[in-house]
Amino acid sequence: MHTVHLDEHADFAAWREQARGLCAAGLRPDQVRFVPPDRVEPALDFGQAARPAARRKVVASKEFLERAERAVCVAEPARFDHLYRLLCRLQDQPSLMRNTVDDDVRWLTEADKAVRRDRHKMHAFVRFRKVGEREDGREQFMAWFEPSHFIVELATPFFTRRFPNMDWAIVTPYRTAVWNGEALRFELGGTKDDVPSEDVVEEQWKTYYSSIFNPSRLKVAAMKAEMPVKYWNNLPEAALIPELIGGSRERERQMMDSLNFDPNPIADKATFQPEHVEKDLSPPDVDALWEQVEVCRRCDLWDGATQGVAGVGPDDAALMIVGEQPGDKEDLSGKPFIGPAGLLLTDLLREAGLDREQAYVTNAVKHFKFEVRGKRRIHQNPSASEIKACNVWLDREIELVKPKLVLCLGGSAARAINGRPIKVGEYRGRVLTREDGLKFFITSHPSYILRVQRYEEVPTARPAMVEDLRRVAELLAA
């Protein structure tokens, strides 16, 4: 048995170097054992033998390497052994990664998914507390977080981009990340007692959280799935949740009474755009995709829009919902389907037995196309070239989420998915399949119901769409 001791929990570079040499030397997976710090050693261990000489060239696809770099972070002692077995098998089976039912490929998929989910939780639930200031006035903060996997090195570069102008440290049981404004370094882990239990900003944060709490979208089970109870002790807003849930009905009624659909007075001024820095047309995850959509210049729609609007929802959703493009409210907020059509869509999905929070919701086109009339920005249909230009982002969302079914709302969405014009009236309510095997279902856009509310067909338009959505629910349950 050739034993390789790894000094770090998630050292992909060290594993890759050792694994390439051992695989090149022809050592089978059952002849190699990788021992990270979290793996318990057997009573007898004769250490690491000299690595045999290489006998063949070792190759691995970019997809395997990208997913393996995340999978080494999963909290499973035998993770490096799993990856080595896959690497060895890939030498004789180059197309193995396409066999999604293979046990080793399935393990890699699940490990990758678990790590990406844990990274998302860290990005969402880290709460910094102020601990002081430097002599130059630069503020210093600390946070405590308990990840389920070894993701600190993978997840913390996000915070250097988000909070570059303050010093901070994120303490976890196995590793501490420290940022001083110039460099990110990693030290030994700590305990919760190393971080203050509260600070002066906390009451402001609770006030903010109370103000953004949306009772109309409250689903307790979905909330606990997205924000597991294990994180609540570290979240100041968690103390407010029972009270907010208890008063949600009354708050929902107040919100409905105060809805205002008047023209937005800043609509004709919201034209700021960041510098164009698009670099990667195949971002590795949804967070990176958001960053690239924000600076996309693949067509001219960015010029008048406030910002790019990518999709939201679970990155492993079984259902992906694709609309046409952001509207006025979506453009200003940066989130899809939050205007009148979005509110109606939520109601229609609920009536059909579908939970919008469990779906990944996006649009075929990521920037708002409009014409200005007075103080209002009036929606315009995107052109074929604009839909085609945005396909790179929609296709990447599909690759990342891997939905079981795509629900196309309207003709523009159907064209984006199908690759050519398609008549909604002719194909609505049917399951279609692309050449790559992707299954999609076409129905009306909810804005159609809003447009025809003055005409005779409104009594049938809404029930017809609900019936289509019920069919979608059946397909997902099958």
Image (cartoon, rainbow, N blue to C red):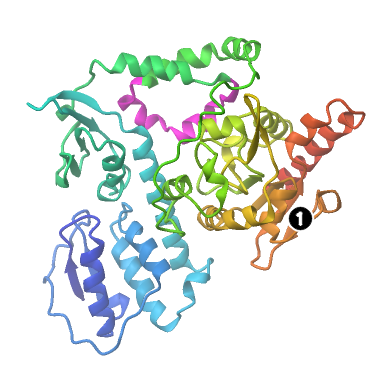
Q: Quadrant of the N terminus?
A: bottom left
Q: Quadrant of residue 15?
A: bottom left
Q: Tell me the kind of residue under disc 1.
A: Val
Q: Which residues are magenta?
A: 216-236
Q: Quadrant of residue 229?
A: top left
In the picture provided, is 43 more to the left or to the right than 105? left
x 72%, y 62%: residue: 433
In this rendering, would 215 be left or right of 79? right
Residue at image point 30% right, 67% down: 81
Q: Residue at x 66, y 31 (%)?
A: 346
Q: Which residue is under mark 1?
A: 431
Query: Is residue 478 shown left or right of residue 243?
Result: right
State the residue in front, 266 or 161: 266
Q: Eyeballing the image, is 366 above or below 137?
A: below
Q: Nearer the viewer, residue 227 or 332?
A: 332
Seen in the picture, residue 276 relative to 435 is either above or below; the reply is above
On the image, the x and y values in percent for residue 261 come to 65, 19
Question: Element type at marker 1?
Answer: strand
Which residue is depicted at the point 39% across and 14% down? 207
Depicted 371 relative to depicted 151: above or below: above
